[in-house]
Image: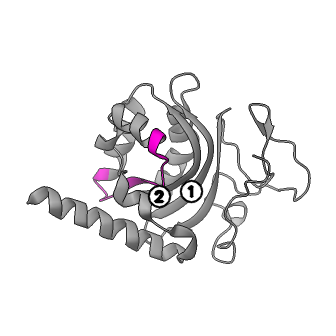
């Protein structure tokens, strides 16, 4: 896991440690010293811990004018034992919502497992953003992670599924990701109407 680095090609557009509205404002990173771990595995020092012992993140992009954030995740999403959704909601999401972010894109290529717990925080998050025409989208989930999330009925609160698992996001400009996700959302909404 130590060689899985957060996506870095958008650093010319945004860096969370220089954004005074970011929960990670002012953080300093080592390029070479590996001191952070998930379980017993060292991870790349550019990842941000936010309180979860099993998952970390990197805010890759924020557009406050459009109310969108793009966040990459690494680790195990464990709502059952460590209540990761509560920590994520309280430590990161609530902070971003208070700064005008209502659209959340999570790049889940490196989410290794999901263990379900209560739906309360997902429901609260949905209610926080829906009135602002906001949403939460999980992109590029592994099949087994998606199946676990769907069996926990998270699709009622977040956008996920095969349409969102085909986004080749690393080749896009960050503003193109929002457009791509919203087009897929609009297409899914149209299909539900017919």
Label 2 with label 1: CB-CB less than 8 Å? yes
Residue 120 part of the magenta-drawn span: no
Q: Which residues are magenta?
A: 130-144
Q: Nearer the viewer, residue 129 or 148?
A: 148
Name the image quarter holding the C terminus: bottom left
Q: Residue at x 36, y 55 (%)?
A: 162
Question: Which residue is most to the top?
Answer: 81
Q: Which mark is residue 71?
A: 1
Q: What residue lies at 61% left-to-right and 63% top-to-bottom?
A: 60
- Quadrant of the image occupied by residue 14: bottom right
Sequence-first tag of 2 and 1? 1
- Neighbour class for label 1 at 10 Å: few (<14), some, many (≥20)? some
Q: State the separation of the CA atoms marked 2 and 1.
A: 6 Å
Crowd tier of the residue under label 2, counting other residues whose Cα lies within 10 Å: few below 14, some 14–19, many 20 or above: many
Q: Nearer the viewer, residue 104 or 25?
A: 104
Question: Which residue is situated farthest in the front direction here?
Answer: 143
Disc number for residue 152: none
Q: Position of residue 188 (x, y in %)?
A: 23, 60
Q: Secondary structure at mark 1?
A: strand
* As drawn, 110 above or below 132: above
Question: Which residue position is annotated with label 2?
Answer: 105
In the depicted structure, whether residue 70 falls above or below residue 116? below
Specify whether residue 102 is in view.
no
């Amino acid at each position: 896991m130590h060689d899985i680095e957060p996506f870095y090609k958008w650093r010319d557009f945004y860096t969370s440690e220089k954004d005074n509205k970011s929960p990670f404002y002012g953080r300093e990173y080592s390029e070479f010293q590996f001191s952070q771990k998930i379980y017993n595995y060292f991870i790349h020092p550019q990842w941000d811990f936010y309180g979860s012992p099993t998952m970390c993140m990197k805010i890759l992009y924020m557009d406050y004018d459009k109310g969108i954030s793009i966040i990459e995740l690494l680790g195990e999403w464990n709502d059952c034992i460590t209540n990761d959704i509560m920590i994520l909601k309280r430590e990161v999401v609530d902070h971003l919502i208070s700064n005008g972010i209502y659209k959340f894109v999570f790049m889940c290529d490196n989410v290794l497992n999901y263990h379900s717990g209560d739906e309360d925080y997902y429901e609260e998050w949905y209610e926080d953003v829906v009135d602002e025409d906001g949403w939460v989208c999980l992109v590029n989930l592994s099949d087994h992670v998606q199946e676990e999330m769907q069996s926990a009925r998270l699709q009622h609160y977040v956008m996920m599924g095969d349409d969102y698992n085909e986004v080749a996001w690393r080749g896009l400009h960050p503003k193109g990701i929002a457009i791509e996700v919203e087009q897929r959302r609009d297409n899914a909404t149209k299909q539900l109407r017919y």
